[in-house]
Every structure is written in C-alpha cells, then in structure tokens.
Image: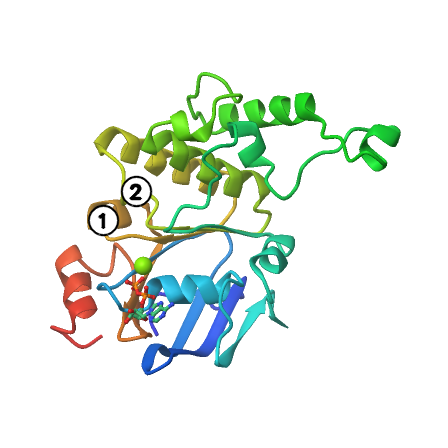
Amino acid sequence: MSAQPSTTVEPLFQARGIVKRFGHVTALSGADFDLYPGEVLAVIGDNGAGKSTLIKVLSGALHPDEGDIRLDGEVVTFKTPLDARRAGIETVYQDLAVAPALDIASNLFLGRELRRGGPLGQVLRMLDKREMRREATRALAELNIDVQSVRSAVQDLSGGQRQGVAVARAAAWGRRVVIMDEPTAALGVKETAQVVELIKRVRERGLPVILISHDMPHVFELADRIHIMRLGKRAAVVTPQSHTMQEAVAIMTGATAA
Ligand SMILES: Nc1ncnc2c1ncn2[C@@H]1O[C@H](COP(=O)(O)OP(=O)(O)O)[C@@H](O)[C@H]1O
Ligand SMILES: [Mg+2]
C-alpha cells in the first residue's frame, strides 16, 4: 500500500482483516485500516462499499466477525460505543445521534453529566446545570459554532447547527480520534462550509480525524490521505498529491485497478 506518511511513525489506530456479515450480506470482507497521528484520513467509496460498517466496527457500535483492531499497537475490543469513547474515540454517526428535545448543553454532556458537589450531587444525583452550560458555551465558542444560547433545544436549530453540536461534542470529548460519517450530507452550502472549517480546527488541535464523505472537492481539500473502500475492502490509499479526483473515483468504482 502506498501513501504511508513515514516509515518511523506507527499507526495510532489500525484494523486488519475485518469481516462483518449481516445474514447473507458480507458488508466487510477483510478490510484493513490505518490512521496515523494528527492526520485527516478521508474514507471514500460507492454506496454499499462498507464505509459506515467499518466506522461502526472501529467505534464499538458493531462487532466484527473476524479481524482485529489495535490502538497504539495494542489489540482492543470495544463491546459498546461507550468503551470506544472511554478510549478517547468519539464518533459522529451518519444517522445523527443528538437528543432533539434536550437543550444544547445537555446534548454536549449526554451520558457524562456533571453532578453537583456534596450530597446534592452524590446522593440526590443533582446535575450541575450551570457548570455544564458554562462548559458548553466555551466548547462551542472554541470551535466558532454560532448558537443563540446553549439553553436552546436542539430541535429548534438548523441542520448545520445541529451538526455543529454533534461535531462539537465529538471534538470536545475525543482525546485520541474523532470520526465523522458524512457530516455534511444533509447540509446546505453555508453550513457545509462551517463544518469544513470545524474539521480544520479539530486537526489544528492535533486530533486525527476520520472523515467519511462523498464530497470529492472537500475530501481533496481536507484529507492528508484518502482510504478508498470497494466491495467491503480497502482497495487503495492515495493522497491529493498522488492522484486526481478522477483517478480516485476510477479506483472507487473499479474502472481502474488500484
Ligand atoms: N444492519 C444491516 N443489516 C443488513 N445489511 C446491512 C446492514 N448495514 C449495512 N448493511 C449492508 O452492508 C453493505 C455495506 O453497507 P454500508 O457499510 O452502510 O455502506 P456505505 O456506508 O459504504 O454506503 C451494504 O450492502 C448494506 O446494505
Ligand atoms: Mg454510509
């Protein structure tokens, strides 16, 4: 496989020979994967190529039938997405996982609510809403996400703002890796540009990003390397320098061999 950053840098996050079947459908048929520190790795492929399934396997949402996953060279088994999150891997799924009825601050702290100090928090499990609102405001400001108030319900936000909340949550909690599956698929032009800027800011903070996207211009603008899925496997890894968009699409569709 070409397009390795350097022979001395080890992959941060790696998978080998991943197989995942759904009944008679083999979604992944021996997929490999490598993510290096600090990079934006785009994952591209036709519909049904196995991109979302790969991401779900890497983030603990699905269990592979075969193959192994390594984080810092150690084999890891994520039984649930929470296991992956505890290991520092945050995912923005394609089927958006925000709680629409809750406000922005509550969404950012979903599953990690801050409790008040003393018996109010320890015994009565009372939430420290003020501190959560303060932290949420700070997290959104740091990523330049514009919302009127972190008390707004997520269901009252535009698609781009909702996506911003999901991305901000991942960026705020992801200590090792941020994964985004088609983060701009449902967005308009302006909102898409905001998410592209967000991804750049996450990378500037030194966090590697796995970006699944159909949008070739954005892939070529953002990615350090491009992992091309075809028929449930990694067909090739290219870079925006080594290949044109047309060449990458040709590998993706099988028009040319990798
Ligand atoms: N939960 C599921 N049950 C059955 N088949 C599935 C399931 N999830 C994905 N598949 C199938 O696995 C293949 C890969 O799907 P997916 O990973 O969603 O591809 P992509 O994200 O690249 O479009 C497709 O044929 C899809 O229909
Ligand atoms: Mg998908």
Q: Position of residue 37 (x, y in %)?
A: 51, 55
Position of 165 compared to 238: left or right?
Answer: right
The residue depicted at 58 percent of the width and 32 percent of the height is 106
What's the amino acid at mark 1?
Answer: Asp
Q: Image check: 113 left or right of 115?
A: left
In the rendered image of this protein, does residue 200 appear above or below residue 20?
A: above
Say which residue label 2 marks: 184
In which image quadrant can residue 173 be found? top right
Asked if 200 appears above or below 249 in the picture, the reply is above
Q: Residue at x 67, y 21 (%)?
A: 130
Q: Residue furthest top?
A: 148
Element type at marker 1? loop
- Label 1, on which residue? 215
Asked if one can make out residue 219 in the rendered structure from this viewpoint, the answer is yes
Q: Looking at the rendered structure, which numbered label has been put on residue 54?
A: none
Disc 1 residue lies near ligand 2 with CB under 8 A: no
Above or below residue 178? Residue 13 is: below
Query: 10 Å neighbourhood of mark 1: few (<14), some, or many (≥20)?
Result: few
Q: Quadrant of residue 161?
A: top left
Query: What's the CA distance linking mark 1 and mark 2?
Result: 9 Å
Q: Residue at x 20, y 62 (%)?
A: 248
Task: Give the foreground label among 1 and 2.
Answer: 2
Q: Image quarter for residue 70?
A: bottom right
